[in-house]
Amino acid sequence: MDIPHYDADVIVVGSGACGANAAYRLAQKGKSVIMLEAGERVPRWKIIENFRNSARKWDYNDAYPNRPWAPTSFQEGYIENTGSFEFLPGMLKLVGGTTWHWAAATWRYLPNDMKLKTLYGVGRDWPIDYDVIEPYYGEAEIQLGVSGSDTEDQSGQGLGRVFPPRSTPYPVSPEPLVPVHKYLKKKLEPHGYALIHAPNSRTHKPYDGRPACRGNNNCMPACPIGAMYSGSIHVDKAERAGVKLITTAVAYKIERGERGKIAAIHYKTPEGGDVRLTARYFIIAAHSFETSKLLIISDVANSSDQVGRNLMDHAGKNMHFLADEDVWQGRGPIVGGCIMNMRDGAFRSRHSAINHVISNGNPQSGLTRKLLSQGKMGRELDDAIRHYSARWVELSTFYEALPNPANRVMPSTTRKDAMGLPMLTVHYNIDPYCQAGAAVGEKQYRDIVRLSGGIFQDVSDWQNHDHLIGTMIMGDNPADSVVNHEGRTHDHDNLFISSVGIIPACGLINPTLTGVALALRSADIIAREV
């Protein structure tokens, strides 16, 4: 009998944080791995130069390539919204993926976040308990170099002990609090508000070849010195471990084989090439939107008709007020912590949990546009910019969505990109659960401003936060989910998804650390089987 020849043991599609960590883990275990990336490799210096030369400093995608064969989410017309909410995440396509520009917040989910249906009668339960993923959280924190507190209760419930439970300490101690966090802590904690340090993968000490953060406040669109983690770090590690990276490789077809297995990946090149690669196992680890599109146009892993559905984000609002003293938001990293009193509790049966993120981005560009629109010019403008910049405070609030099959991403049926592949259509509406949470959150805004002695400025409209959860939802039942607890697709036992898109209940926290932890777990499962 002929022995099948494979191009690799495992092919990974996507070189972001999840895909790169999975590829590196498999290479460390002696497996041959090919990693495909639709975008190109861009050195950090070039991204920083692009940013400095950009007239669109507010556009976090502008410093990055936006190629005809690899369009980003900000390419005009690439994403069409058909719902009431305009969903436009900051998706990038280059080696390292979208973690080139992110706030680097790396929280763990709480045990209760994983049992939302059981405890509160809404949403979905995870098919695994916290204890199953906990060791992988610790490993993911080491890989990403997470800075955090080993003594804090991150639930905000005043438990008086570290929570959620940890079997290992954070690899880096917590960074010092930024001035605006110190100010709010002083004003609000005496009145029962829980201000929690945000664990993050922006190291304030030299770590794993990365320099210590110097407080450039440029985490978005790009850390100028590489103190903040990006998926490119593990791409480099994976290549040194033997992974073969192929750039400008636009995966467009997942080929079915015999007995329900996946046989090959097909990709196109900008030069017109069309390549077929085979492997024993496959991991799709592109952006949640692009992974969903690839599965749908390939007609794989979708017997449940749930691919692309159940899209969740931490859609929320921003509130601004003027403090009663100078706080100079914009010194240090762009996020320092959160007000977390309503992260968990019986109220979740009625409305979403609430996370008021203490923003620390430099506000001067936005303030200048605001003041110019009011007609201020010359010395009056200069004085107003200084006054507002010194005392400006921004809370960026996250609300917890529930999975809804009607909220979804789909391949466009009318628009194609330069490669002849469908663009994206997104249908998303803010659910009543979030709306009810926002009513409570906006009451808290008034209380926070009052207790701070500040002057209220405004509340924004609803905004998305790039946390694209649920599009390949995880569950035990193949009839209403796409992957099982391992990240393995129900329909094809050699096809895995490594993405925040498999998370079945979005909770309140940035999902990247969880995506990496699940990717490491999937990689270990694959390594045992290959």
Image: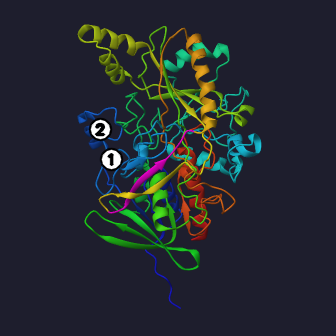
Residue 379 seen anywhere in this rendered image of the structure? yes
Position of residue 45 in the picture relative to residue 285 (left or right) = left
Of the numbered discs 1 and 2, the one sitting upstream in the chain is: 2
Residue appearing at x 66%, y 47% in the figure:
134
Task: Please identify the quadrant where the C terminus is shown.
Answer: bottom right
**Whole-Å distance between the Cαs marked 1 and 2?**
20 Å
Label 2 Cα crowd, 10 Å radius (few <14 / some 14-19 / many 20+): some
The label shown at residue 75 is: 1
**Disc 2 residue type?**
Ile
Q: Nearer the viewer, residue 367 or 305?
A: 305
Residue appearing at x 48%, y 34% in the figure:
463
Q: Which residue is mark 2?
A: 48
Helix, strand or loop under label 2: helix
Circles 1 and 2, Cβ within 8 Å, touching? The answer is: no
Residue 421 is situated, as x and y percent measured from the top left of the image, at: 36, 61
The magenta stretch spans residue 271: no
Residue 287 seen anywhere in this rendered image of the structure? no
Residue appearing at x 30%, y 48% in the figure:
65
Above or below 455: residue 176: below
Foreground disc of the pair 1, 2:
1
Q: Which residues are magenta?
A: 420-430
Residue 192 is situated, as x and y percent measured from the top left of the image, at: 68, 18
Residue 408 is situated, as x and y percent measured from the top left of the image, at: 52, 51
The label shown at residue 152 is: none
The picture quadrant where one finds residue 332 is: top left
